Amino acid sequence: MEDPTATSIRLWDLPVRLCHWSFVILIPALWWTAENDEMHWHMRLGMTLAALLAFRILWGFFGSSTARFTSFVRGPGAVLGYLRSLGREPHVPIAGHNAAGGWSVLALLGAMVLQVGLGLISGDPDYGAAGPLYDIAGYELAYDATEWHTKIIFNVILAVVGLHLAAIVFYRLFKRDNLVKPMLTGRRPMPKDSSGMVPVPAWRALACLAAALMLAGWLWAGAPPFG
């Protein structure tokens, strides 16, 4: 039950929420297109994911306060301290990612970046499906990358997503803390005098988006040399 004395604060900005829910849609869509041999769509969706990842990483440096990596990436001591606190009551909500959740965000972003990177050099042109950087990688590296792309890293992503979902269920059932709603609305109740998200000018989001789209376009074109 939510504390009636709590106040609603801004927590997640629109770019963070759009990236989050886009990942939710793209990961199963990429799996489905690969499983059903819809490789043209698979590669298009893969480039969309590449652009979103590039944007989210840039936004982690230049975005609003709760979006920045510096706001939620903590050392091992902070992570252990937070995990120990889960056994104590009352549960005190955090305005942003907690110390453990911050590392899960990095793990998921890192796994997706690695998966996209492998996809760029994976495939076999003889079968009509090869990443835009296949020619740079060559057959042997592309073969190994395909094995990792299809059989290993995707399972790592599934494992991290599974932990993420388990954490959501844990907080909802045992801590009465709804983590999904704030990612939909951008707001959440917090104890009075809590600090909310500090926004940044909209031009930063546009600049990050432009850089991400340029990177995706360059990769889609087969990464020709600049100039």
Image: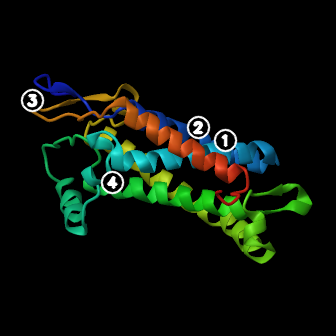
The answer, for residue 176, to whether it is visible in the render is yes
Residue at 35% in and 32% down: 13
Spatial CA distance of label 2 from label 4 is 21 Å
Q: Quadrant of the C terminus?
A: bottom right
| Badge 3: residue crowd in 10 Å (few <14, some 14–19, many ≥20) | few
Q: Amino acid at mark 4?
A: Gly
Q: Nearer the viewer, residue 175 or 47?
A: 47
Spatial CA distance of label 2 from label 3 is 35 Å
Q: Are marks 1 and 2 in contact (CB under 8 Å)?
A: yes
Q: Amino acid at mark 2?
A: Ile
Q: In the rendered image of this protein, does residue 177 appear above or below residue 132?
A: above
Q: Which residue is mark 2?
A: 25
Residue at 90% in and 59% down: 127
Spatial CA distance of label 1 from label 4 is 25 Å
Q: Which mark is residue 29?
A: 1
Nearest to N terminus: mark 2 or mark 3: 2
Nearest to N terminus: mark 4 or mark 3: 4
Nearest to N terminus: mark 3 or mark 1: 1
Q: Which residue is mark 3?
A: 192
Q: Amino acid at mark 3?
A: Lys
